[in-house]
């Protein structure tokens, strides 16, 4: 049978659709597999070993993989570990499905069927009556059609909503801040602003633009996430990065602007707590991000310190409306809007055009004083109503991008700048030997050595959207012309794989007229990790589940090699892989984590690269290491400095690394005056 019924649910084992009273939830294949094993057991205990064997079938998984699947399954079923109304935990043994009377199941299904049939019958009858009435009255139908035409003509002539094609213009009034590098601007009354002065060593300053008076509030501040001003305009709250027992994390702190007293709101525990949003005097919302860049939106009771998770996934930032009833969140690479009721989030259904326009993880936005949402798109400012409709579209006519938006007393301010990164080639043995690759005013990142060649490929925004460019001598050629590319890797000298919106594409430069080919895969791909001419190794992430997957480039077949948290991984052989988990390098042999005894307790930085059987990596002390996991040997072979920080590829032959580096550009704080 393709379907089964339990607890009022209907599950389709083939499609993974879970239905209850008209609500449909799409379950991931792993959740369906676990549920099928529990259902087939008909209430009997299923051991951990049985579930591992039947569901994962020999695939190496993290020790807590089963527990994570059970937690997700319970969430989809409306169950919890505390209630265990549907899935029961047998400590240290396994799980079972809680069965209810078959009579109750049948009765529930019959009632649901009767409700559906009654609704369908009502819809058919109503539609039939409408059709008969209008078919028998053609004059009335013609009259209504004419009326509709008149109404739309009136709207077109007398009410023309502003669209992007005809965006209004704005005046940008520059506010002198006497500094060129700053961020995290907080406007205050009386033309005062708080911001972080990067030129002065990350000083938190209070600046008055009328008399140019400056006051240092905090020296060498390390803010993580967004700074937020409290309702009383006297308290500034933010996440502050600290070193805790040799490991970085971020605690929530509060700063009194008048007294400069710094107080701890919430300590960190190996996580990054940031972006505090006060709902009321008792409740604080904040984002907690772990070392795998996964986040949760947490509701904190300030008095009891009790935490409640409201949303989990990839949360980049969050904004709360002035009346504290609505949240706009960059969630899983798109903007989603939620109603905030008591201690729960309810997703708001918005127009398709809203979702399409705002499907990006790099959105700059803010709420206005009246609750409308303002978003910076390209070189325009778009104002949306709470229902997701465009109210206005204003062209900024500036060569710089908007990096921050903020409202104060019905006045809109913007911080303008140019997000400029540069790809650099540097020697790890001669630190002053640094060469820029195709220097420009655009964002160039992810430099890669083209195999068996002196050419270097980069991801660059110089054509408007991020594309792959190839530098050969003094020539710079654009290889792709599509939507924004987020990652790329060379399979061999002629073929390159790249990512667009979590889909893998292949491009062969050996063809006379190269045409990209999209790989038809049934999983989203987050990162390209490793490649041979026959196999591509990628990181896939579905909700909170991260997997290492091998793609056979001939058949497009997929093999899951590892499941569990990791940021970066490389496959050594059929039984061994290495991965980075929480900035620590680990070796997994036959599913078991093995110690890397050759390496000291390092905190690693950025991505790391394997050439042959050797791994090249960076640590936070700015050393470059050569590590051989097969022989379990390691040595420092060089170093790096602030001129080339974040490794994006490594050359074994020349001992040179490519790196992503931020290029300092001037910021400008402006007040926006609408024409």
Image (tube, rainbow, N blue to C red):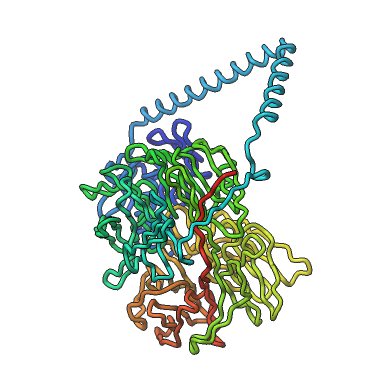
Which residue reaches farthest right? 512
Q: Quadrant of residue 471?
A: bottom right
Q: Residue placed at 27% from the left, 56% from the top?
A: 258
Report the front residue among 582 and 530. Answer: 582
Q: Is residue 32 visible?
A: no
Q: Please provide percent x and percent y for residue 133.
A: 67, 11
Placement of 595 over or under 364, stated as above or below: below
Q: Quadrant of residue 346?
A: top left
Q: Please provide percent x and percent y for residue 290.
A: 37, 60
Q: Give the total of numbered labels.
A: 0
Q: Residue placed at 42% from the left, 61% from the top?
A: 212
Placement of 510 over or under 133, stated as above or below: below
Q: Please provide percent x and percent y for residue 190.
A: 39, 50
Placement of 120 over or under 276, stated as above or below: above
Q: Residue placed at 61% from the left, 77% from the top?
A: 437
Q: Please provide percent x and percent y for residue 67.
A: 34, 54
Report the front residue among 544 and 414. Answer: 414
Q: Is residue 124 visible?
A: yes
Placement of 343 over or under 289, stated as above or below: above
Q: Quadrant of the C terminus?
A: top right
Report the front residue among 480 and 580. Answer: 480
7 left or right, relative to 447: left
Q: Residue placed at 25% from the left, 52% from the top?
A: 91
């Amino acid at each position: 049978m393709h379907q089964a019924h339990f607890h009022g649910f209907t599950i389709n084992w083939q499609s993974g659709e879970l239905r209850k009273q008209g609500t449909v939830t799409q379950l991931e294949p792993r959740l369906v597999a676990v549920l099928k094993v529990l259902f087939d057991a008909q209430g009997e205990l299923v051991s951990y070993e049985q579930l591992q064997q039947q569901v994962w079938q020999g695939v190496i998984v993290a020790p807590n993989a089963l527990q994570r699947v059970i937690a997700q399954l319970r969430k989809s079923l409306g169950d919890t570990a505390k209630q265990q109304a549907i899935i029961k935990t047998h400590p240290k043994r396994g799980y079972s499905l809680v069965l209810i009377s078959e009579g109750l199941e049948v009765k529930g299904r019959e009632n649901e069927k009767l409700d559906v049939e009654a609704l369908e019958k009502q819809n058919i009858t109503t539609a039939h009556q409408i059709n008969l009435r209008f078919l028998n009255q053609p004059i009335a139908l013609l009259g209504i059609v004419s009326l509709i035409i008149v109404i739309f003509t009136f709207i077109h002539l007398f009410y023309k909503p502003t669209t992007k094609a005809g965006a209004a213009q704005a005046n940008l009034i520059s506010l002198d801040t006497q500094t060129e590098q700053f961020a995290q601007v907080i406007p205050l009354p009386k033309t005062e602003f708080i911001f972080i002065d990067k030129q002065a060593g990350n000083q938190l300053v209070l600046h008055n633009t009328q008399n140019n008076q400056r006051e240092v509030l905090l020296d060498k501040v390390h803010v993580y996430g967004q700074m937020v001003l409290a309702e009383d305009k006297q308290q500034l709250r933010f996440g502050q990065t600290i070193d805790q027992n040799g490991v970085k994390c971020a605690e929530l702190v509060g700063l009194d602007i008048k007294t400069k007293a710094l107080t701890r709101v919430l300590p960190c525990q190996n996580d990054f707590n940031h972006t505090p949003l006060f709902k009321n005097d008792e409740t604080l919302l904040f984002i907690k991000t772990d070392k795998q860049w996964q986040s949760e939106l947490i509701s904190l009771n300030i008095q009891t310190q009790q935490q409640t998770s409201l949303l989990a996934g990839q949360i980049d930032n969050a904004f709360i409306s002035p009346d504290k009833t609505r949240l706009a969140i960059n969630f899983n690479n798109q903007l989603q809007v939620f109603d905030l009721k008591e201690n729960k989030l309810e997703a708001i259904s918005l127009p398709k055009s809203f979702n399409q326009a705002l499907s990006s993880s790099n959105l700059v936005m803010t709420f206005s004083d009246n609750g409308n949402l303002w978003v910076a798109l390209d070189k325009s400012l778009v104002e949306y109503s709470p229902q997701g409709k465009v109210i206005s579209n204003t062209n900024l006519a500036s060569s710089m991008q908007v990096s921050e938006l903020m409202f104060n007393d019905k006045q809109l301010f913007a911080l303008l700048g140019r997000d400029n990164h540069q790809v650099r080639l540097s020697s790890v043995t001669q630190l002053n030997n640094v060469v820029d690759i195709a220097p420009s005013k655009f964002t160039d990142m992810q430099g890669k050595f083209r195999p068996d060649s002196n050419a270097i490929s980069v991801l660059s925004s110089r054509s408007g959207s991020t594309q792959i460019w190839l530098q050969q001598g003094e020539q710079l050629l654009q290889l792709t012309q599509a939507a924004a590319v987020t990652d790329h890797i060379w399979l061999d000298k002629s073929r390159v794989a790249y990512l667009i919106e979590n889909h893998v594409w292949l491009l062969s430069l050996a063809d006379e007229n190269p045409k990209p080919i999209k790989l038809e895969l049934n999983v989203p791909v987050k990162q390209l990790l490793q490649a041979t001419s026959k196999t591509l190794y990628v990181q896939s992430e579905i909700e909170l589940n991260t997997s290492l997957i091998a793609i056979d480039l001939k058949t497009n077949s997929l093999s899951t090699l590892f499941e569990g948290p990791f940021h970066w991984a490389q496959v050594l052989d059929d039984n061994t892989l290495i991965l980075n988990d929480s900035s620590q390098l680990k070796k997994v042999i036959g599913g078991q984590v093995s110690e890397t005894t050759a390496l000291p307790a390092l905190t690693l930085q950025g991505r790391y690269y394997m050439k042959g059987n050797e791994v090249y990596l960076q640590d936070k002390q700015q050393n470059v290491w050569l590590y051989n996991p097969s022989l379990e040997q390691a040595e420092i072979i060089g170093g790096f400095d602030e001129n080339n920080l974040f490794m994006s590829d490594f050359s074994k032959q020349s001992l040179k690394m490519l790196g992503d580096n931020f290029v300092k550009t001037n910021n400008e704080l402006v007040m926006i005056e609408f024409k």
